[in-house]
Each structure stands twice: as C-alpha cells, then as structure tokens.
Image (cartoon, grey):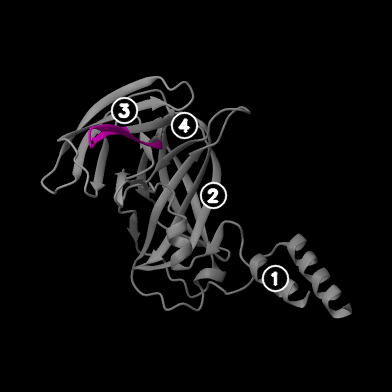
Amino acid sequence: LASVAEQYAQTTRYPDYSIPLTPPQAQAYEGNRYHPVALPLEGEGEFTVTLDKFRFTRGEPILVVASLSGRQIVGDQLKATLETAQSREQAETATLNAGEDAGYYQGNLGSDHTPGEYRLIVEAQVDGRPVRHASSLTIEPDLGDFGGLESPFLSNNDLVIPVQFDPEEPGYYALSAQLYQGQEPIAQLQAETSLSGSSGVIELRAHGSVLANRELQGNLQLRHLQLRQLPARPGDRTHHAFGPDDGYDFSPPDLDRLRDEPAVNPESEQRAALLRQLAERF
C-alpha cells in the first residue's frame, strides 16, 4: 500500500496538460503511423503493404508500396482497391507497377472521397492464384491550416506556447504535441479550446515540473502536432488533422523562474494524503 501511495503521488505531481515523456513513450504517442501487416505465403514468403501514414487528408495522394518475398512467381503488376469499410463499396482502383528492386511494387490512389474508414485491398497473382492483402486507412476532412507559433511566454509556473490554427469550421478542438530539445523528448502537451472564427490560437503549456532543473540550452522543438475536431453531437465522428512533418523550432524565454513543484490539484492531494494515512495504518 505504501508503494501504491508513492506511485499515485508521482503520477499526480504532473498536470494532465503536461506529462513527462521517455523515448519509447514519445514513439508510442506518434498518432499518424501506419503499422504494416505481413501476410504469410507458402515457402516462407511474405506479402506486405506499406503506407506512409494511417490518416489522409481528403484530396492528397495515397502512396501504396507492396512487397512480396519468397520463391513464388508473381506478375509485373498488382491491383489496389479502396473500398468503404461498412458497405464495401468500391471507391477507387489503381495499378501497382513493379519497381527496380525485385519484389517491390508501388502506385497511387486518390483520397477525394467522403471522409471515413476505408479498406485497402491489394491483390496479387502468386503462382497463378489470386492472393488478397487487406488493411485499413482513414480519410479525414480538411480541418484548416496550421499557421506556426506566436511568441512563447511564461505564465505562473508554465511555459505557454501559442499555436496558430485557422479552422475551416467553428467548433471545439483538442491539440496535442511533443516538446523536444534536439533528439530528447521532454513532455507530451495537450489543450482543448473552442475556435469560432477563421483564425485562432491554441495555447499549449509545459509545466515547471517537466522543465525546471534541466540543462536546456538553445532552441526547443514542438513535434508531432495532432489536432482533433471533437464531435458536435453524440454519434458524430472525431476528425483529425496533423501539423507539419518537421514541427516547429522556437527560442523559449528565460526559464530560470520555473519551479520543479507538483501541480496544485486539491482533490489529488487529498487522495494522496488518504493513501499515505492508510499505508501508515497497515
């Protein structure tokens, strides 16, 4: 029970909007990654389809790369089909042509279709028999444009990083991003706000508990920006958008006055105190 009390106190010392990150956690939080699935073939071969991401903004090309390994005989072309996940209605087809490297094929599908969940079917003729590889992807509406960062500043025990976003539609939005110095992840930041006009600002905050007592020199980076447009009504989809691949590089103000102190949350402090009291009794 004492260890539970200590663990709870550690997790509640950071506010929900500013959580410290280890490198493995940082990789897990990257939200627009496509995880290839290898389909086993006879003779220890594999049929793998790879995309550069999982979510595509409507209108951008979908580059499909397929690879087949093993001793099978495969033709010079594969067929790729995009179909809706629920009705299995065909949305588009494309041909994947053989590349210079043996066993590799690639081609493009369009994504100018109704936003939602889709199935990607890639079909090959292996030793004269059809083999189908199925995977999933999502087409998202164009939510708007990221416009960069405004000047960061300090407020109370937070480094405030204002992110400009020009929404296509008013609504309630949630933004998350990772704060880095060079290759070292520092914290996962998140904020929610209502955006009503054609331009807006979402303020991410890095708490002093993740920044103080660090040897921070030079610029910081904001990476892996992910925006969600939250549903206006129950049952509506949550839509997603993503910031620039390179993120944003910025020069922070003087961070010396930030303090490595737990976030003030009276309810969490009361729970931690209660757990400590119970641990002392037992």
Q: Position of residue 89 (x, y in %)?
A: 40, 19
User: Magenta stretch: residue 131 in it?
Assistant: yes
Drawn side of residue 269 relative to residue 282, left or right: left
Q: CA distance from mark 2 to mark 4?
A: 18 Å
Tell me, yes or no, whether the two marked residues, 1 and 4, touch with CB atoms within 8 Å: no
Q: Amino acid at mark 1?
A: Ala
Drawn side of residue 41 relative to residue 30, left or right: left
Q: Position of residue 209 (x, y in %)?
A: 56, 70
Dot placed on the residue nearer the N-terminal end, 3 or 4: 3
Mark 1 residue element: helix
First to last magenta residue range: 122-136
Mark 3 residue element: strand
Badge 1 local density, few (<14 within 10 Å), some, or many (20+)?
some
Q: CA distance from mark 3 to mark 4?
A: 38 Å
Q: CA distance from mark 2 to mark 1?
A: 23 Å
Badge 4 local density, few (<14 within 10 Å), some, or many (20+)?
few
- Identified at 38% across, 25% down, the residue is 83
Q: Quadrant of the N terminus?
A: bottom right
Q: Amino acid at mark 4?
A: Gly
The front one of 217 and 278 is: 278
Residue 118: image quadrant is top left
Tag 2 residue: 191
The front one of 69 and 29 is: 69
Q: CA distance from mark 3 to mark 2?
A: 38 Å
Q: CA distance from mark 3 to mark 1?
A: 51 Å
Tag 3 residue: 81
Tag 1 residue: 9
